[in-house]
Image: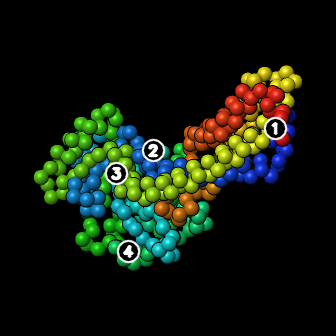
């Protein structure tokens, strides 16, 4: 630390160049963090999937229904703790741009299968007691300014009409990456208002199992239970289901990552070239340090320390900016509900910035270390 004033003085000789180099790294690391958040949005569903949950869908397609009578049969299978069902609603709030996921759920079993979503007990009881009740995610409620007690009108799409819900609860997640954009309401309310053809069917099931190690066996048992029926099933782990959804968006993810990666590395190369040039300009000054008794290793270390300091400063600035940006939630209005940058990604970004800074300074630092004092002092 005693050489810190020397490092700061050297970096402050040409303040504009130092500031621009730091900002270049900040922009590059902001982009890195943004790409990490976007990539995480495509894969986070798989990352946060419960190891003790299975997803049961129609074998033909997830958009094909399953009978509600399957729930009792699934729960009778040894190893199954609880089964709950979902129905996609797909309604419109205000206009088509106001997108958030809406699900008709079974309140009696939902919280046992998904304990990570937290609703205050009094709010949940009010929701359960009101057939027209609803619970919204914290992010969605904040986005639209909803509060408990509000009346929420949603226009149906494949189930037409205006559906009005009483907001009795706002849920939050027990983990930072939990999806806080969903909107839940009673399946029985949906069934009552829906056309006759909709009675007795659900979209899919989530099944909580006692032992995650038994998942492969239970997947097979559940599908064999409904084999050769009118509604055959496809059972998979929740992680496998989330991964399959992510793969459907694979081309978009690759395109974003490829374009962003090119821009990111271009910025780093430009920054590295600027830093290398700055070090080369100071070769004669570094030779003076050697002339007054400082060792070759000290010269090497001081140059690398300056390079790493610039890179780390820019990295911290850029990563702090993207962390603040992600705290605002999904910027797409519902397309990326898992919009979050982990501390692991922040640490990786900072390490990458410092590595690039060291790489940019290593060649001129080695040349300065090896340069003879008499030759260096001849340079103007």
**Could you tell which of marks 2 and 3 lies nearer the N-terminus?**
2
Between 263 and 145, the one nearer to me in the picture: 263
The mark closer to the camera, 1 or 2, is 1
User: What is the secondary structure assignment of the residue under circle 3?
Assistant: helix
Q: Residue 178 vs residue 27: left or right?
A: left
Residue marked by disc 2: 48
Residue reaching furthest to the bottom: 161
Q: Residues within 10 Å of mark 4 (few under 14, many from 20)?
A: few
Mark 2 to mark 3 CA distance (whole Å) = 14 Å
In the rendered view, how is the structure colored?
Answer: rainbow
The mark closer to the camera, 3 or 1, is 1
Residue marked by disc 3: 244
In the rendered view, tell whether residue 315 sits above or below residue 195: above
- The residue sitting at 35% across, 73% down in the picture is 159
Mark 4 to mark 3 CA distance (whole Å) = 26 Å
Residue 175 lies, in percent from the top left, at 53, 44
Judge whether residue 52 can be spotted in this image: yes
Residue 157, labelled with which disc? 4
Between 197 and 325, the one nearer to me in the picture: 325
Residue 379, labelled with which disc? 1
**Could you tell which of marks 4 and 3 lies nearer the N-terminus?**
4
């Amino acid at each position: 630390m005693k050489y810190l004033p020397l490092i700061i003085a050297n970096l402050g000789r040409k303040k504009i160049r130092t500031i621009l180099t730091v900002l270049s790294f900040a922009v590059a690391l902001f982009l890195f963090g943004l790409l990490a958040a976007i990539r995480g949005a495509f894969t986070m569903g798989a990352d946060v999937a419960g190891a003790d949950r299975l997803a049961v869908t129609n074998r033909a397609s997830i958009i094909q229904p399953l009978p509600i009578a399957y729930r009792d049969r699934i729960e009778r299978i040894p190893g199954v703790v609880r089964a709950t069902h979902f129905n996609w609603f797909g309604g419109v709030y205000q206009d088509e741009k106001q997108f958030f996921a809406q699900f008709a759920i079974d309140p009696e079993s939902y919280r046992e299968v998904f304990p990570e979503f937290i609703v205050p007990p009094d709010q949940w009881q009010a929701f359960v007691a009101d057939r027209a009740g609803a619970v919204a995610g914290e992010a969605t409620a904040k986005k639209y300014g909803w509060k408990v007690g509000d009346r929420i009108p949603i226009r149906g799409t494949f189930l037409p009409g205006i559906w009005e819900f009483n907001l009795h609860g706002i849920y939050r997640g027990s983990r930072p990456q939990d999806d806080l954009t969903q909107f839940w309401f009673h399946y029985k309310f949906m069934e009552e208002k829906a056309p006759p053809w909709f009675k007795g069917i659900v979209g899919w099931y989530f099944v909580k199992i006692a032992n995650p190690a038994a998942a492969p066996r239970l997947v097979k048992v559940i599908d064999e239970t409904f084999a050769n029926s009118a509604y055959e099933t496809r059972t998979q782990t929740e992680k496998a289901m989330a991964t399959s959804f992510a793969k459907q968006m694979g081309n978009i993810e690759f395109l974003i990552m490829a374009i962003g990666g090119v821009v990111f590395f271009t910025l780093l190369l430009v920054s590295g070239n600027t830093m290398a040039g700055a070090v080369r300009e100071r070769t004669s000054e570094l030779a003076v340090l050697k002339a007054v008794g400082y060792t070759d290793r000290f010269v090497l270390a001081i140059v690398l320390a300056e390079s790493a300091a610039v890179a780390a400063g820019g990295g911290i600035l850029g990563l702090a900016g993207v962390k603040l940006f992600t705290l605002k939630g999904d910027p797409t209005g519902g397309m990326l509900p898992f919009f979050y940058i982990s501390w692991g990604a922040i640490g990786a970004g900072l390490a990458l910035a410092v590595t690039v800074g060291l790489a940019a300074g290593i060649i001129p630092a080695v040349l300065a270390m090896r340069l003879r004092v008499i030759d260096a002092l001849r340079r103007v």
